[in-house]
Amino acid sequence: MTYKSVTQYQPASPVELVRAYYDVLTEGDFTKLQNLMTLKSYHMSLQAFGLRLSFKDATFKSQLSDIEENAVALKNVEERLQKEKRVKIIAYSIVIQHVKENGEERKIVEYTENGKAKKLYFSREAEGWRINYYAGRKTSCT
């Protein structure tokens, strides 16, 4: 998928979001990645991407643990991860298998990435569908 800018492109469905997610990871653009996810899920992703680096750099580790409360720490972590290219995915093949409902405002997309089974969870937010790792939890409707 081609992005003209973060504000000009917004995937309309969870299936489009899966493809956009991998395109953005390939680009390594955290601004676009943040646009596809809930804020909590975005922070969780940054923490996962930065885990290895945090073992080697105490300052980075401190900033990584502070990204939810400190905008400067968040910006520094994003810049450092982009510089280190910790998120770069070289090549991938995505095949969508199923889309499941998980309550009224949640969906699960099951797909394969290079033949390996994966799932991403989504919730309908005010801005539209977003990747939401917490949306995989059972609701009282399911």
Image (cartoon, rainbow, N blue to C red):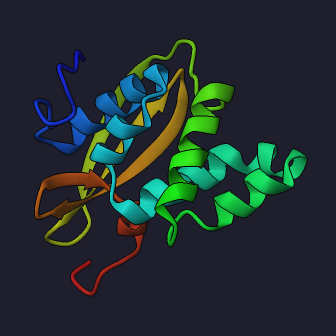
> Which one is in front, 84 or 117?
84
- Toward the front, the furthest residue is 72
Camera-nearest residue between 38 and 115: 38
Q: Quadrant of the C terminus?
A: bottom left
Q: Residue at x 47, y 60 (%)?
A: 71
Q: Is residue 52 visible?
A: yes
Name the quarter where the N terminus is drawn.
top left
Numbered marks: total: 0
Give the left or right position of residue 8, taking residue 20 as reference: left
Q: Is residue 55 above or below residue 104?
A: above
Residue 85, visible in the rendered structure: no
Q: Nearer the viewer, residue 104 or 46?
A: 46
Residue 81 image position (x, y, % from top left): 62, 36
> Residue at the location (85% across, 56% down)?
58
Residue lying farthest right?
56
Q: Position of residue 84 (x, y in %)?
A: 68, 28
102 with respect to 71 (left or right):
left
Q: Is residue 36 above or below residue 32?
A: below
Q: From this view, report whether residue 26 is shown above or below residue 41.
A: above
